[in-house]
Amino acid sequence: MKLEEAIKQVKPVSREAAEASRKRWDGIAKPLNGLGVLEEDISRIAAVQRSAEVSLEGKAIAVMCADNGIVEEGVTQTGQEVTSIVAGNMGTGQSCVCLMAACAGARVIPVDVGMAGEQNLPGVLDRRVAAGTRNFRKEPAMTREQAVQALEAGIWTAELFAEQGIRLAGSGEMGIGNTTTSSAVASVMLKLPPEEVTGRGAGLDTAGFQRKIQVIREGIRLHRPDPGDPVDVLSKVGGFDLGGLAGFYIGCAALQIPVVLDGLICCSAALLAAGLCPRVKDYLLASHAPAEPGANPALKFLGLKPAICAGLCLGEGTGAAALFPLLDMAERVYRTMSSFEEIQVEQYQHLV
């Protein structure tokens, strides 16, 4: 699907299915809201799948991999070569997210949207737009046409998930420098100053952290990205991985697949997706409360509640991999536990 076609195909979720799901939760023989956010997540999935008979069979995590020209500005600890090394490990099932996903019964599908390193890595899908973006402190990160191409790479990935029978998707990324691009996008889309949404990424010292904030501020001042035009924001200060993720969220929504976010990068991509198609927000779930400061205001804007508070900051989609088993447990309770009526006990009532 092309971008405009996918956006038009996103329909409202089923409020009726969500309400039926909540009623089922209330009738199960346990305290009301006893499983907290996990109950809400199952009901959100019911709304997306348009049925209170929720199915979590078939899980996979899409990982968008790309490089960012902004690393020239000294905003990272490591070089771009790390991106393709980790992506290659994903392709062979050896990265952190792959090991976690295997425990959760999920597959990991890495996608090269714009890495600067070796092309056609085994096990990595090739949807490369270019060999990394440009340095947005000096020039726009990409052309508008490239931004759309990255978005459509994500939509293509969602179509692949649908063809393979995936009922619950996760999302992640790999790209050195992408906490800088994500903080820049979050700053523009949330209309917050860079210092409020920028963190230390993978361990910058204080001087590097201050440099990172200044680079973001200068890039935004130079290019004046328009928050009312998410494609403009993506093209000027974003990254190909962000575009791929945003398109993946739109594609999943168009194909009625609920999708779990990971950390800051996924949250910033979700801001772009929601800017292009507000209905996408109802198809998303938050896995955890990320350590990067820009993620929490992004989640608040998206209306999402994280289920996990564990200080996760690894990326790659590890948050989605961590949430999957919790959702499986909640779904087992939801589907099989006795009701108050069945055990002949008076049901709890909502008193507030």
Image: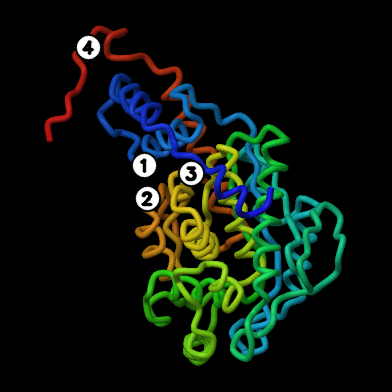
Return the disc, 3 or 4, that comes first in the chain's sequence: 3
Q: What is the CA distance from the residue labelled 1 to the residue labelled 4?
A: 25 Å
Where residue 345 appears, x then y in whole percent? 22, 11
- Closer mark to the observer between disc 3 and disc 1: 3
Mark 3 vs mark 2, CA separation in Å: 13 Å
What's the residue type where badge 2 is placed? Answer: Lys
> Is label 3 in contact with label 1 (beta carbons under 8 Å)?
no
Residue type of the residue flagged with mark 1 = Val
Q: Is residue 252 above or below residue 175?
A: above
Mark linked to residue 345? 4
Q: Are marks 1 and 2 in contact (CB under 8 Å)?
A: yes
Foreground label between 3 and 2: 3
* Label annotation for residue 37: 1
User: Of the residues tagged 2 and 4, which is closer to the observer?
Assistant: 2
* Label 3 secondary element: helix
Identify the residue at horizontal 53%, vertical 52% (top origin). Answer: 319
- Of mark 3 and mark 2, the one earlier in the sequence is 3
What is the spatial separation of the Cα atoms under label 1 and label 2, in whole angstroms? 7 Å
Q: Amino acid at mark 4?
A: Val
Q: Which residue is mark 2?
A: 305
Q: Earlier in the sequence, mark 1 or mark 2?
A: 1
Residue found 48% across the figure and 35% down from its top: 48
Residue 255 position, x and y percent, is 60, 39
In this view, the residue in front, 95 or 44, is: 44
Give the mark nearest the N terminus, 3 or 1: 1
Q: Amino acid at mark 3?
A: Tyr
Q: Position of residue 39 (x, y in %)?
A: 37, 34
Q: Quadrant of residue 352?
A: top left
Q: Residues within 10 Å of mark 3 (few under 14, many from 20)?
A: many
Circle 2 sits in a helix, a strand or a loop, which is it? loop
Which residue is identified by label 3? Answer: 283
